[in-house]
Amino acid sequence: MFSLSPVSRRRLQRFRRNRRGWVSLWLFALLLLVSLGAELVANDKPLLLGYQGQLYLPAFKRYSEQQFGGQLPFQPDYRSQYVRQLIEGQGGWMLFAPVPFSADTPNYDLLVPAPSPPSAVNWLGTDDQARDVLARVLYGTRVSILFALALTAISTLIGIAAGALQGYHGGWVDLIGQRLLEVWSGLPVLYLLIILSGFVEPNFWWLLGIMALFSWLALVDVVRAEFLRGRNLEYVLAARALGLPDRWVILRHILPNAMNATLTYLPFILTGAITTLTALDFLGFGMPAGSASLGELVTQGKQHLQAPWLGFTAFFALALILSLLVFIGDALREAFDPRA
């Protein structure tokens, strides 16, 4: 049975006593869960379909129109009146998601030109291509959060490894490492992205790889300082004198203390990753054209000032995500504060 140490339990209690951070953690977890299941919330295909005594899952499996009595061997448009008559005429039924639009589904039944204002059909209105804004926010939020989580995980591994090696060995390893970090951190990341975008088409993995080359620098100084302090502690010197290998001294005796300061930085690395991806999408150097993203929604709000719901939606979506992460980070900082 896994059990927390007394120190960890006290930290967890301090974190839970911070009501703002504790509630923010649950809200962010709920937001992540909803965005991961965006297909269950916003989808132009039925979640469940009943036809001639059989059940189908069009949202997760591709079917042809011929399977429902049609003429074409292609996937049907389940929202069209023709397909509805084919299915319902045989006693069938369809269960749609609460938002019957996907991220790239245009609404052809608008009563006003796109971008259209919020309505009973499109709760947050549509963009300039008649696509549902709420659906695009859900899918764009998922991309932003997954990008930030992946970038944070990669940055944490590289940053901790680099800082641990510098701080533990010191001497020439630390000196050369610091000079390399100074050179590497001086490279203009945004300009490199702009230049490289002229040679390759940006996508999720390409952006993740480029950003991971630079985002780990923020953790190196923190981990390095903890290892420089921890390597001279008595229990660390005793472990080394007993012949314990360096890797076990690092992992068992110094790294747990260094993680206290590192954990407080993680929510802020997440916010930096989200804002960076949003900025790149806003400038046109981010996700491929047409992809659902918060930065693309910001661009549409800038281009269509007569449709304020676009700008307001992008602002409140980003403000909610970033505020939750900042509140979580502030609560973590207080929970791991050694003065507490």
Image: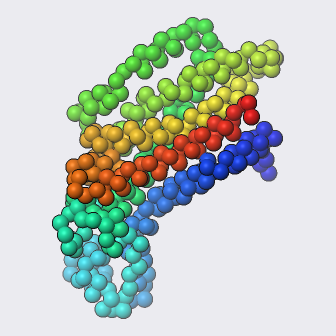
Is residue 85 toward the left or the right of residue 161 in the image?
A: left
Q: Quadrant of residue 307?
A: bottom left
Residue at 41% in and 64% down: 39
Q: How many marks?
A: 0
Q: Quadrant of residue 133?
A: bottom left
Can residue 79 be seen by looking at this rendering? yes
Of 3 and 329, the residue lying toward us: 329
Q: Residue furthest left?
A: 113
Q: Position of residue 58 (x, y in %)?
A: 37, 73
Residue at 39% in and 38% down: 276
Determine whether 230 is above or below 46 in the image: above
Of 87 and 186, the residue lying toward us: 186
Q: Position of residue 199 (x, y in %)?
A: 23, 33
Rendered image coloring scheme: rainbow
Determine whether 33 is above or below 4 in the image: below
Q: Residue furthest top?
A: 172
Q: Position of residue 283 (x, y in %)?
A: 27, 39
Determine whether 333 is above or below 219 in the image: below
Residue at 40% in and 33% down: 211
Q: Position of residue 181 (x, y in %)?
A: 47, 17
Is residue 14 toward the left or the right of residue 138 in the image?
A: right
Can residue 240 be seen by looking at this rendering? no
Of 49 and 333, the residue lying toward us: 333
